[in-house]
């Protein structure tokens, strides 16, 4: 799953997959702003066929948080 | 249905785009009262696809009033070619959006009238300070009401208030040449309010048009940008079999093709033809490009009871066994229009690929394999927009018919001189006025072949030039025994130096090139200069990819090259072709 997630992040944030890890966040990815975050949420929702609630979106501060939220929605992280 | 990429696709692409790579440039300003992040980037990418470098200005969140009212604002230093003001009803209505009924009917009416006045004044303030056109969005009519089904029984209720606001704005700007109303409400109803407005995105970032609809919104706005740049299409070239009717006339026969109200597929083709006819009536040229036996196909066009489009609706019919690319090039040549102003519709994807490969400038439409979707496909194309319908546009269909008669007459004439003499060409020269300014601007935007300097001027600029005592702005209406061509020539002369007039612009629509009309108009300017004791007339030729037909015009007329200027001494005796009648005002 990480591969699919990382490829989406890489595409939206325009960074190489190799530079993405659980700690990736607005702190270390320059293009991570509110617009790219929302595009990312939208793409993740479409690709994994899930819908986050607003609170989950506000809780998500880095890539590790995205993994937690996806797991919560029943997406198999090791798939 | 038109499909679109996600917004992230455009954002990524815009970062890699270097607008200075393009020869043609434009400047677009966006103002709004809510978050429209990503719209500027998408417009930039879409302009790039049209080979136009687009610089954008985004007026910042809810700062439109300051940007427009302060004449030293960043908006005016950006100096846009086109400015969009996209407004959301929630911000305009404030608390009234949910509780309009706290106000009396009179107060509600007063509130709407005040909003109309505010916007009209704001728009006026913008066009007074800028040469740009302004496009203001109308307001999305709410589909909710606290009254529910009773809403329509309420006097001047929420929906009626917004409806009235839209109606009043539309009326206020109907005759205002520089202000256009964009149907944002139509955009939202086309895609559905529940799709376009996403509460999660709204609360998260005041996003009122959800991100994946931003590219669709950009398409709509491109509908304004293209005609400002003169990139709108003028002509639809159509295949016949399985495009205008179902089946193949050569195999299925006159009675076997599908074109009937009694057959679902036949109905789809009739509907498609009706929409094409409405475009023709508005001034879009139609032509046929079909591999067929001419007799079979012409019999359908002339005699089939359910054909909507007849021979008179087509400016040119190429029905033969030649390849479609050659046919299309011949159509462009005969109609004297640029290949890039043509749109090609053909059901066969092999033909389409061949056309795209050979003539990428032609817009080859991806027709769906289901004819029931043809009409929708054509309606969704945002390619035929114009910002002004001139008399010339309305007359165009008829003018091409006259052109056909001219060609016949030329073929039957003994020699060219005799033909010209019998045409009885009359040139009426007029100074720019409120009736001719829109057309003069249109000519500067659209004319490519016979255009010495290819300077593009918006209506506002031509208006300013015409009021300038140091400039002459004129145009020429041409007629002959077959009919009226309308205004087909234009010029701008600078008189800054009383001894030396400079031709800033001199152009002629390709429909009238090659009959001495260009010499006739220039001779008029020469005589005007002589009357004003001018010593020299200066011409310029700025070569472009397309203006080769005007390359030798100045030397052939008697201009001599000095440095990079062409100079005509007014001691010369200029020569107007004898077959022309030139009439001044």
Image (spheres, coloured by chain):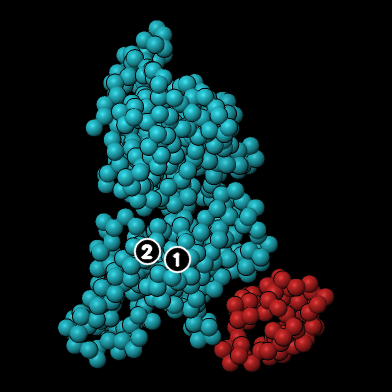
Chain colours: A red, B cyan
Identify the residue at image location x=83%, y=75%.
Answer: A18
Left or right of B69 on screen, residue B346: right
> Who is closer to the viewer here, B55 or B164?
B55
> Who is closer to the viewer here, B319 or B285?
B285
Identify the residue at image location x=24%, y=81%.
Answer: B111
Q: Which disc, if any, is residue B109?
A: none
Identify the residue at image location x=49%, y=24%.
Answer: B559
Residue B186 visible in this rendered orientation of the protein: no
Instruction: Tell which residue pokes out farthest to the top in this image.
Output: B414
Instruction: Tell which residue pokes out farthest to the left in this image.
Output: B106
Circle 1 packing at 10 Å, graded few (<14), some (14-19), many (20+), is some
Q: Which disc, if any, is residue B76?
A: 1
Q: Is tag 2's residue or tag 1's residue first in the polypeptide sequence?
A: 1
Would you say the residues marked 2 and 1 are in contact, meaning their CB atoms lie under 8 Å apart? yes
* Chain of the residue that carries numbered disc 1 in the rendered image: B
Vertical placement of residue B562 versus A14, above or below? above
> Who is closer to the viewer here, B284 or B426?
B426
Where does the image place residue B556, in percent across and percent down from the top left? 49, 21
* Chain of the residue that carries numbered disc 2 in the rendered image: B
Q: Which disc, if any, is residue B129?
A: 2
Quadrant in the rendering for residue B529: top left
Q: Which of the image's four quarters has the C terminus of chain B? A: top left
Circle 2 packing at 10 Å, graded few (<14), some (14-19), many (20+), is some
For mark 1, give the secondary structure: helix
Quadrant in the rendering for residue A59: bottom right
Where does the image place residue B304, in percent across and percent down from the top left? 36, 32
* Co-location on one chain, circles 2 and 1: yes
Count of marks placed on residues? 2
Residue B475 visible in this rendered orientation of the protein: yes
């Amino acid at each position: 799953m990480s591969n699919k997630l990382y490829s989406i992040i890489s595409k939206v944030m325009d960074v190489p997959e190799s530079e993405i890890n659980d700690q990736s966040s607005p702190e270390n990815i320059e293009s991570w702003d509110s617009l790219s975050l929302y595009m990312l949420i939208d793409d993740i929702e479409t690709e994994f066929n899930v819908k986050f609630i607003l609170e989950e979106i506000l809780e998500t501060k880095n890539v590790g948080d995205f993994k937690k939220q996806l797991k919560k929605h029943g997406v198999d992280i090791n798939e | 249905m038109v499909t679109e990429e996600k917004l992230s696709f455009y954002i990524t692409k815009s970062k890699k785009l270097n607008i200075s790579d393009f020869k043609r440039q434009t400047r677009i300003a966006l103002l709004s009262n809510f978050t429209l992040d990503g719209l500027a980037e998408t417009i930039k990418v879409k302009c790039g696809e049209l080979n136009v470098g687009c610089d954008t200005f985004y007026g910042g969140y809810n700062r439109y009033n300051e940007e427009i009212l302060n004449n030293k604002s960043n908006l005016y230093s950006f100096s846009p070619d086109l400015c969009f003001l996209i407004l959301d009803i929630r911000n305009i209505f404030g608390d009234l959006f949910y509780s309009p009924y706290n106000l009396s009917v009179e107060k509600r009416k007063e509130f709407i009238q005040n909003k109309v006045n505010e916007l009209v004044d704001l728009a006026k303030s913008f066009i007074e300070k800028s040469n740009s056109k302004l496009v203001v969005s109308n307001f999305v009519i709410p589909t909710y009401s606290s009254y529910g089904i009773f809403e329509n029984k309420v006097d001047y209720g929420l929906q009626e208030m917004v409806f009235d606001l839209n109606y009043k704005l539309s009326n206020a700007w109907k005759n205002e040449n520089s202000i256009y109303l964009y149907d944002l409400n139509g955009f939202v109803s086309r895609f559905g309010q529940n799709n376009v407005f996403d509460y999660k995105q709204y609360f998260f970032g005041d996003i009122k048009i959800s991100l994946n609809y931003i590219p669709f919104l950009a398409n709509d706005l491109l509908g304004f940008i293209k005609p400002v740049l003169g990139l709108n299409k003028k002509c639809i070239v159509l295949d016949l079999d399985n495009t205008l009717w179902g089946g193949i006339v050569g195999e299925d026969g006159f009675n076997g093709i599908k074109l009937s109200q009694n057959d679902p597929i036949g109905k789809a083709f009739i509907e498609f033809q009706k929409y094409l006819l409405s475009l023709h009536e508005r001034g879009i040229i139609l032509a046929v490009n079909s591999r067929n036996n001419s007799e079979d196909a012409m019999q359908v066009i002339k005699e089939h009871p359910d054909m909507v489009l007849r021979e008179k609706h087509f400016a040119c019919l190429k029905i033969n066994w030649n390849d479609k690319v050659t046919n299309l090039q011949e159509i462009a040549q005969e109609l004297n229009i640029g290949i890039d102003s043509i749109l090609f519709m053909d059901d066969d994807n092999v033909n389409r690929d061949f056309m795209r490969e050979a003539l990428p400038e032609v817009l080859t439409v991806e027709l769906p394999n289901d004819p029931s979707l043809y009409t929708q496909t054509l309606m969704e194309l945002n390619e035929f927009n114009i910002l002004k319908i001139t008399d010339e546009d309305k007359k165009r269909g008829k003018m091409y018919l006259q052109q056909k008669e001219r060609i016949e007459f030329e073929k039957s004439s003994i020699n060219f001189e005799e033909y010209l003499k019998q045409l009885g060409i009359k040139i009426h020269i007029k100074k720019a006025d409120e009736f001719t300014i829109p057309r003069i601007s249109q000519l500067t935007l659209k004319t490519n072949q016979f255009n010495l300097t290819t300077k593009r001027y918006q209506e506002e600029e031509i208006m300013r030039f015409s009021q300038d005592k140091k400039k002459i702005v004129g145009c020429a209406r041409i007629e002959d025994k077959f009919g009226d061509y309308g205004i087909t020539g234009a010029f701008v002369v600078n008189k800054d130096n009383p001894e030396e007039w400079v031709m800033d612009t001199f152009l002629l629509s390709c429909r009238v090139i090659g009959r001495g009309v260009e010499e006739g108009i220039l001779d008029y300017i020469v005589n005007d200069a002589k009357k004003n004791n001018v010593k020299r007339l200066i011409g310029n030729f700025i070569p472009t990819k397309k203006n080769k037909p005007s390359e030798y015009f100045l030397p052939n007329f008697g201009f001599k090259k000095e440095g990079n200027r062409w100079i005509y001494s007014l001691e010369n005796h200029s020569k107007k072709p004898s077959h022309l009648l030139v009439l001044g005002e």
